[in-house]
Image (cartoon, helix red, strand yellow):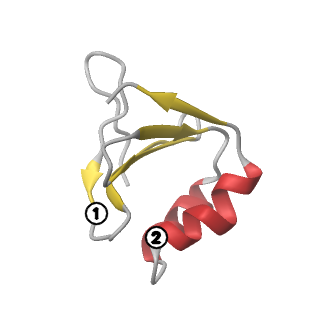
Amino acid sequence: MAPTIDSMGRIRRWPVSSSALRSVGYDPQTWTLEVEFESGAVYRYLDVDPLDVEAMMAADSMGAYLNEEIKPHHEVEQVDP
């Protein structure tokens, strides 16, 4: 995933094929993962290693990977959609 900061300083997200997630973006400079859920809620997970992001994107279930490998280990903040 390429650097994804827009002109407003927001992380740009791309649609994903997932039953739980609608879109995902990542800023490799700050190690910030941004996830939009199917509900429309948007969260940022802080200090996420790029290898974890690659593993999530390649996982059979991105939602399960996020719940099991990222959520328990990273600070999270809700973002206005």
Q: Residue at x 32, y 49 (%)?
A: 39
Q: Amino acid at mark 2?
A: Met
Say which label, 1 or 2, has the lower sequence index: 1
Q: Is 71 situated left or right of 36 in this image?
A: right
Q: Residue 41, how many percent across, how many down?
A: 38, 40
Q: Residue at x 45, y 76 (%)?
A: 58
Q: Quadrant of residue 29?
A: top right
Looking at the figure, which quarter contains the C terminus? top left
How far apart are the alpha carbons under marks 1 and 2?
A: 9 Å
Q: Are marks 1 and 2 in contact (CB under 8 Å)?
A: yes
Q: Residues within 10 Å of mark 1 (few under 14, many from 20)?
A: some
Q: Nearer the viewer, residue 67 or 1?
A: 67
Q: Residue at x 35, y 48 (%)?
A: 2
Instruction: Report the residue marked by disc 2.
Output: 62
Q: Residue 71, how many percent across, how many down?
A: 65, 53
Instruction: Report the residue marked by disc 1.
Output: 16
In the image, farthest residue toward the front? 39
Residue 54 to residue 78: above or below = below
Labels in figure, total: 2
Looking at the figure, which quarter contains the N terminus? bottom left
Q: Look at the numbered disc 1 and give the secondary structure of its residue.
A: loop
Residue 44 to residue 48: above or below = above
Q: Residue 6, how many percent across, how many down?
A: 27, 26
Q: Look at the numbered disc 2 and give the secondary structure of its residue.
A: helix
Q: Amino acid at mark 1?
A: Val
